Amino acid sequence: MKIKYYGTGAGYGLPEVFCDCRICRHAREAGGKNIRTRSQAVLDGRLAIDLSVDTFHHSAFCGLDMRKIHHVLVTHNHHDHFFTTDLFSRVKNMTEPVHFYISEASGQGVRALVEKYEAEIAAGKRDPHAWTRAVVHTLEYFKPVKILDYTVTPLPARHGKGLDPMIFVIQSEEGNVLWGHDTGKFYPETAQWLKDSGIVFDFVSLDCTLRRGAQITPSHMDLDWCIEMAELLRCNGNADENTKFVLSHIGHLVDRTHDELAREAAEVGMIAAYDGMEIEFGRKKEKQK
Ligand SMILES: [Zn+2]
Ligand SMILES: [Zn+2]
Ligand SMILES: [Zn+2]
């Protein structure tokens, strides 16, 4: 399996537009891996996770071709993860719809829009060949669904109330992924489900939004909490020596430049993501070695 991170920033990207902190200044001066756009990743070139406000940027400048991706998992409806404005435009030659998988609470807005436009198309008021076609699938916690040849199980994320944010367990014959954004420390029921599942993850992506030791909100994590979650996964049999732990959703709050965070992460056997990072993992790759 392979995953590509297109956007590894937190809610406001890096540098933040009006900010003059050390991290934002460094990002402007040094560029490169210090520039972070909003959340988006693609698994095996065909299953996207999130459609953030920076999807346009990823399409225009980073080689992301959403015409080829028809399935999008959406963690929750915050603008840095789901930006529906890009979805409804007068596109041409879109023959296959894009499928979104999202919780009931986070999907309310997009579902209403899709229904409205589909009704207009059915009534002959809108050209079906000049409009974005989308299908919205409602996910429920702990209920697995089949998407392509993946089995995806959404679990409760600790990330505010009202949006039913989701952590995703993505299983395939070639490997297992745990996508943990946005979330604070795993809820006990999430950890318990993972333990009971017996799944050993090849790849785990964790929310590292906060400065180490400055746990100012329970809805995100710092490096210490990420280390704690990695330990929990190891203790519960969900991770082993081959599991890759990656940190993402990184903004200026983390108070580290990319190199500083990468060094600190490497000391504890983790990888700091950056925009454009691609990682291969899982069973197929092991066999090829
Ligand atoms: Zn976010
Ligand atoms: Zn800043
Ligand atoms: Zn969020």
Image (cartoon, grey):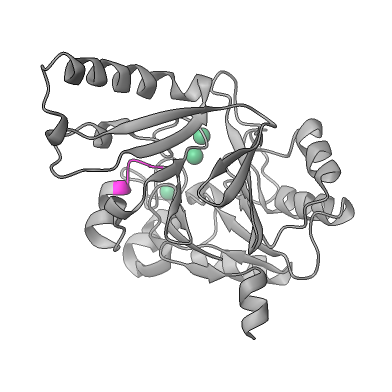
Image quarter of residue 247: bottom right
- The x and y percentages for residue 34 are 42, 63
Number of marks in picture: 0
Q: Residue furthest right?
A: 235
Magenta-colored segment: predominant secondary structure: loop
Magenta-drawn stretch contains 54 = yes
Q: Is residue 150 above or below residue 216?
A: below
Q: Is residue 270 above or below residue 112?
A: below
Q: Which residue lies furthest to the bottom in this view?
A: 289
The reply, left or right, for residue 190 in relation to residue 81 is right
At a point 43% along the width and 55% down the height, the residue shown is 46
The reply, left or right, for residue 131 in relation to residue 195 is left
Magenta-drawn stretch contains 43 = no
At a point 25% along the width and 37% down the height, the residue shown is 86
Could you tell me if residue 234 is visible in this image?
yes
The reply, left or right, for residue 55 in relation to residue 199 is left
Q: In which quarter of the image is the C terminus?
A: bottom right
